Amino acid sequence: MARKMAPKTKAATPGTAPGPGRRTYWLRSLIALAVCATAVGGLVAYRTLSDEPGERPVTVDEAARLALSRLNLFQASPVKVTLDAAEGGGVTVHVEGVVDYRDRRGTGRYQVAGASGALDHGLVVWDAGGLGLAPEPDGTDGPAWQQAERVPRQGWSPRSYTADPLDAGLQLIVQLGADRPDNPLLLAQSGARWLGRDRLDGRDHDRFAGPRAQGAAPDGERSPLTYWVDGDGGLRKLTMRMPGLGTPTTVGFAGRDDTAKLPEAPWLTG
C-alpha cells in the first residue's frame, strides 16, 4: 500500500470476560478430552514438557490452551486491538481500535507512514465483508468508535477486502473470536507446534505455530500464523507472515474495553 490511504469506490455466549473458575473448567474439560483421545487412538502431542529448547509438537495442556484462546476473545468482547502492517516500499500502517466478536465488527483509527514521515490518517471500520474508510470529523475528539458515530453513511468509502497486508490483517482479526473452543485434538493433529516462551507485559506466554489450515501451508511447513498464549488461554499477540514481505503483520490484544459501544454499521461493504 505505497499509495495514500485515500477512499476507494467500488445463542451466543454472553460478551463478558470469563473468570478464573470458568477458564479452569474449560481447560480441565479440554485436557480431559485430549487425554481420553490419546488413550483411545493416539494424539500428535507430547503429554509432558520436553527439556529440549527447540520447537516441538504441542503438549495436551498446550493444545487445550490454544483451543480456548478464541473463546476467551469472544467472551472478552469488546476487545482493544492494535495492528501493524508493512505494505512494502517502506510504507507501514498502524491501527488502534476495538472489535466486538458478538457481531464481528471493528472500529479504529489508522495512520500511514513512509520513509519521509506521516502520509495519511483517518477512521477505519470493518466487518466480515470488508472495510470502510473516512476522515476524522473536524473539531471533535474521543475514541474512534465515538468518532465513527458522527460520520454520516455517505461519508464512508467502503470496499471489499483485497490481498493487501492491511486488509488481510483486519479480516483475520474479525474472524478470530469464536463462541466455543476449538477442538484441541484437531489443533494438534493439524500441525500446531510449540516454538518457545516469551514474557509480555510481565506475564509468561507460550509461542505457538498455529495449525495448518488445508491449503494454507504445504505439508511439513509451519503455519503463517504465530500465537502468544498465556497460562489461562488468553491470546495476547499474533503475527501473520505475508508472501513477498519480510516483516509479518502483527496483531495485539489488550483486553476488554468496557466503555466501547460500536456504531450500528454506518457503512456498506462487499
Image (cartoon, rainbow, N blue to C red):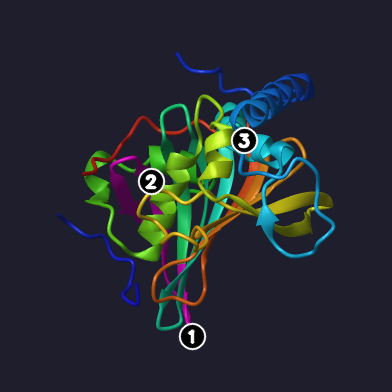
Q: Nearer the viewer, residue 35 or 158?
A: 35
Query: Total marks drawn?
Result: 3
Q: What is the magenta range?
A: 112-136
The relative height of residue 102 versus residue 241 in the rendered view (above or below) is: above
For label 1, count other residues whose C-alpha is less than 10 Å away and answer few (under 14), some (14-19) or many (20+).
Answer: few
Residue 131: say if magenta: yes
Residue 149 x/y as whole percent = 40, 37
Residue 126 x/y as whole percent = 37, 45
Give the SS element for disc 3: loop
Identity, as a three-letter code, of the amino acid under mark 1: Ala
Viewport quadrant of the N terminus: bottom left
Residue 26 x/y as whole percent = 68, 23
Q: Is residue 257 visible?
A: no
**Residue that lies at the very extreme toward the bottom in this rendered image:** 116
For label 3, count other residues whose C-alpha is less than 10 Å away and answer few (under 14), some (14-19) or many (20+).
Answer: few
Of callouts 2 and 3, which one flags the residue occurring earlier in the amino acid sequence?
A: 3
Of callouts 1 and 2, which one flags the residue occurring earlier in the amino acid sequence?
A: 1
The relative height of residue 257 versus residue 29 in the rendered view (above or below) is: below
State the residue at coordinates (49%, 41%). 176
User: Which circle marks residue 115 in the picture?
Assistant: 1
* Residue holding disc 3: 42
User: Which circle marks residue 191 in the picture?
Assistant: none
The span from disc 1 to disc 2 (Cα, nearest Å) is 26 Å
Q: Nearer the viewer, residue 30 or 11?
A: 30
State the residue at coordinates (80%, 43%). 48
The span from disc 2 to disc 3 (Cα, nearest Å) is 45 Å
Quarter of image, res 167: bottom left
The relative height of residue 85 versus residue 80 in the rendered view (above or below) is: below
